[in-house]
Image (cartoon, grey):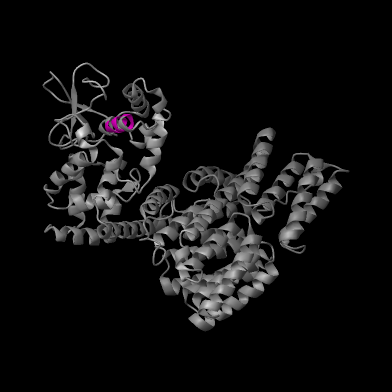
Amino acid sequence: MSFSLAFGQPIHVWQSGSGEPAWRNGRFMCGLGRRSDGPRFARLIVAGVDDPLDVEVFSTDQSARYLRSALGEQHSLGDDVEGVAADLQGLPLALAQAVAFMLDRQLRCSEYRRRFADRRRRLSELLPEPEALPDQHRNTVATTWSLSMEAANQLAPLSVAQPLMELLSFWDPDSISAGLATTGAARNWLSYAVSLAGGPVADIDTIRDGLRTLHRLSLLRHDGDTVHVHALVQRVTREGLDAERRASVLRAAADALLEYWLRGGHSRNLALAMRANADALRRHDRGELVGAGVHKVLILAGTRQGEIGDPLGAAVYFDHLLATSKQLGPDHSDVLELRGHAARWRVNAGDPANAISIHEELVHDFENKHGPDHAGTIVARANLAECRAMSGALTDAIQEMEQVLADCERLFGPHNVHTSDARALLGGMYGEAGAAEAARTMFGQLAADRSDVFGPDHPYTLAAEGAPAHWVIECGDPGTAIPLLQRLLDARMHRLGADHPATLAARGNMARAMGEAGDRQGAADAFDALLPDFLRVMGPDHPETLTVRNNYLLYNSLGMDPDRAANAWMDLIDDSVRILGRLTPGTLTSVHNFGEWLALTGHLDQAAGWLQVALSGRTEVLGAEHPHTLITRAFLARTLNAMTRSIADITDEKER
């Protein structure tokens, strides 16, 4: 990527202390070029050469070599030239002026970087004074870009370039989708800002034209749906805003990011890019996003981090966000919500005990502030019950959840979203406790209710329809589940797309139903095709990816090379312990299945050991009479018995 270096009069890049350029004989000058298309460029004008040359910005290695050369004999100053090169992103004019500043102040590179990272310092404080530059080239980087923006703002569409660049300057320089600038929130703010300067209404076409204008003048690069802005351009733009304007732009950028992210879906790539933008907003925030309340985009960023498979990272994120929101007070509703999110993701990260204590405190605090019938109190109670269920205390969890559901129906009615969510949580607990038929009935009614309220193709309805099929399989009727899952998969593919997590989950359930119905080869092939998609979309550490890995091995490991299969099972168990925790249902399922595989391949002594681990864990977490515990106990008994007779007596009772 290359960027413009100057506008108007050409700028000489001098080696400090000499009358010659840093790297070559003869003088050269860098200036902003205007073009209709083609790659971004800096314009290099070499003395004695009529035609200017278009050049890219320096690579990190080129930048570092330039800095070492420019520092000359003062080697002690070059303690981190690579860091300075990375900070200035290879921009020749910025590198030249930074090294002049370091030489003038006798600053080491590490000290310059410290000052550069200090957001309280303006860029003008990190560059030479104009009088320290050659007489005919007194423009610094900041002045150069200010002149460039003034010129861009006079081009069609009139008065759009400047406010558009202001908006872009608060997002991550390398993670900006052009669609962010055309959201409703962005258009509203841009229309307001452009109208102040007498410009046109900022509709989608006007904004796209504005992006192309900035692209033509090399102030950004616009490639399809992606926009790249140099970090120094962003910094100069932000530093030119007064406090009121800055706060207005930052809030608009946050509103636009929230709108775009919610509309864009749940893919891992989207989450990573939008998270980079949210982190940029947090870096630039001076209280606008957490002053009177926590902006919803900051909460969404943590939630999406957990959803793409990083529950511990999400918990830590919410802990940090809590620390920056202390000024709101401990009883503020946003603070209580953040505490709930932090606890929720600690459960998913394999720390239910700590999460239970946090949720118990939250229930108490919500009741004290809002009363027992407030929606926040009800949600906190539901989350507490869910924590208890995930920790293995299913009996207590079911009792609490039954009371929560009754209160939701009393307070909000049968079709309210809180009531629907409570019914879904309770149905899942019934199923985990072994009452598969009760779960099947409850989820069937839930899907019908959501279809009546939201419509058959609404994501909320589609989410509910997957659960009945799951419990149909658990009830031992996978053949009945297959047509239900096929309808669900078709609807999700059409409504949500192939890479949506819900679509991927439907494919996993379909593959499992095929295997349960006797089509083991079909299931093996389906999981073989599904696993790469989960790894690509959800990432290797997402809990659902671990489930797909388990099911892939379940149907494929007996046909694999034994050493490769054993290593794959062990890797899965190690990853499950790391991500989910040692005593969690998902981890214990993989331990059980590995024990079965060892038994079926003739390694009875080792199989007995692993099955005993699974049995002890399931007894502790699920209870002695849970169906999964009973399956493990029965298979362990068969394995121990088979150690004194033929392995052929062990039947294949694989658990899914």
Magenta portion: prevailing SS class: helix
x then y, percent, for residue 2: 27, 33
x then y, percent, for residue 458: 41, 65
Nearest the viewer among 449 and 77 is 77
x then y, percent, for residue 153: 14, 48
Nearest the viewer among 241 and 89 is 241
Q: Residue at x 69, y 54 (%)?
A: 583
Nearest the viewer among 121 and 389 is 121
User: In the rendered image of this protein, does residue 574 appear above or below residue 45?
Assistant: below
Nearest the viewer among 19 and 179 is 19
Q: Quadrant of the N terminus?
A: top left
Residue lying farthest to the bottom in this orientation: 410
Q: Which quadrant would residue 19 be assigned to in this image?
A: top left
Q: Which residue is drawn at 12% across and 52% down?
A: 158
- Per the rendered image, the range of residues in magenta is 97-103
Residue 100 lies in the magenta-colored region: yes
358 with respect to 189 (left or right): right
Q: Which residue is drawn at 15% across and 45% down?
A: 152
Q: Which quadrant would residue 195 be assigned to in this image?
A: bottom left
x then y, percent, for residue 181: 27, 53
